[in-house]
Amino acid sequence: MKLVAGENYAQSESTTSLGFDVLASALDAERRRLSIPGAVVHLSTPELGSWTQSFGVADIETSTPMTNDSIMRVGSVTKMIVATIALQLVEAGSFHLDDTVHSILPELSIDPAVTVKQLLNMTSGLPDYTSDEFVDALLAAPSRVWTPEGLLEVAFESEQHFAAGTAFEYCNTNYIILGVLIEHLTGTDIADIAQTTIFGPLGMNSTALPPLTDKATRLGSADLRGYHRHNDEFIDATDVNPSWAWTAGNAVSTADDLSVFVGALVRGDLLTASLQRERLRSVPVIDNVRYGLGIADFDGMWGHNGELPGFQSFAGHDPTTSTTLVVLTNVDDKSADQLATFLRSQLDSPH
């Protein structure tokens, strides 16, 4: 069925009595209300089947339509990938969750009490490098290629925030250290590990961890632009080199690839049952959100969101209802989160 609401609809896979066309029309109206240039949404449920839909434009200047297969930066959704690799190494006996980071990477000047598990679940107390000032500097010097060592140097200019294991605080530094730790133990580039252990086996052919070079700014299409919202103005942030996010958030992917990944991850297809249970042991964050080992529980829907200058993402799977939801947008400012929340409210309301 050809969907008709909004300025850009690709062919939908299927519709049912609820009507993906009704959902699409409501979602596109919300996108317009929020002034989101473009979005790609994947939704699958046992009742509705599977649906992937693009909305709006990939480029404000040219009005090039967004497409279903658009490859975008997915920000901290990367953390689910990196955490999975770390947990697979735990399965292989490379280290234990309760091992201290210092015992593996003694050269790092961090609290010797911090464990690998505390990196994964954001209870390490380490200082974060991604301050507002850091992001402003990124926009001022977008072509800079950051190294993990450079990022950690920025982080460790600040003091430990709290005693390890005593509180939760979201911190990108944790996942940069995990990337360093994984490469140290394996002697292999983490991008290659991700391809071999996750992307390849799951058929995620449009997903990658970009290299730490000036080529990292390349996306699947030159027509796709990402925008940073500053007040009421859109600033083109496509060429901000994502090396600054590395294993905390530099992955690129599509809505369909992420739907496969988050479903497999939440169902436990990628780990042993015992380690999957450990992964889902979570600590409270705020309201109805809890955080496990590189994965969050958003009021029953497990997954992650992510944001870099120019892009925002949400990928989640509800194991109770077998519902998968992925939203990718080409503007930051929590835009994908807002559309995901809106769509979940539409699914929960009577029709």
Image (tube, rainbow, N blue to C red):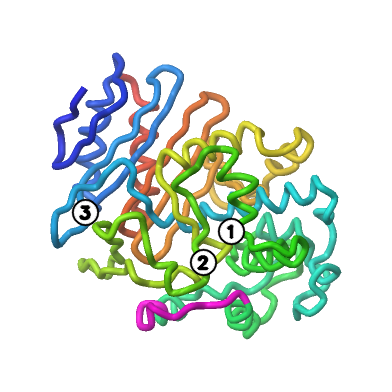
- Nearest the viewer among 115 and 344 is 115
| Crowd class of label 3 (few under 14; some 14 to 19; many from 20; radius 10 Å) | some
- Say if 108 sits above or below 280 in the image: below
Question: In the rendered structure, which amino acid carries the disc numbered 3?
Answer: Ser
Q: Position of residue 302 (x, y in %)?
A: 56, 39
Choose the circle earlier in sequence order: 1 or 3. 3
Q: Which residue is mark 2?
A: 211
Q: Quadrant of the N terminus?
A: top left
Residue drawn where x is 41% and y is 57% of the image: 73
Place of residue 256 in the rendered image (x, y in percent of width and height, measured from the top left) = 42, 38
Crowding at label 1, few (<14), some or many (≥20) Cα neighbours within 10 Å?
some
Considering the whole magenta stretch, tell me its main secondary structure: loop
- Tell whether label 2 touches label 1 (CB within 8 Å): yes
Give the Cα distance between marks 3 and 2.
32 Å
The residue carrying mark 1 is 191
Residues rendered magenta in the picture: 138-148
In the picture shown, does residue 201 fall above or below 63? above
Tell which tag, 3 or 2, sits nearer the viewer. Answer: 2
Q: Is residue 331 left or right of residue 199?
A: left
Comes first in the chain, label 3 or label 2: 3
Query: Mark 3 = which residue?
Result: 35
Residue at 25% of width from left, 32% of height from top?
A: 24
For the residues labelled 1 and 2, the Cα–Cα distance comes to 8 Å
Could you say which quadrant of the image residue 74 lies in?
Answer: bottom left
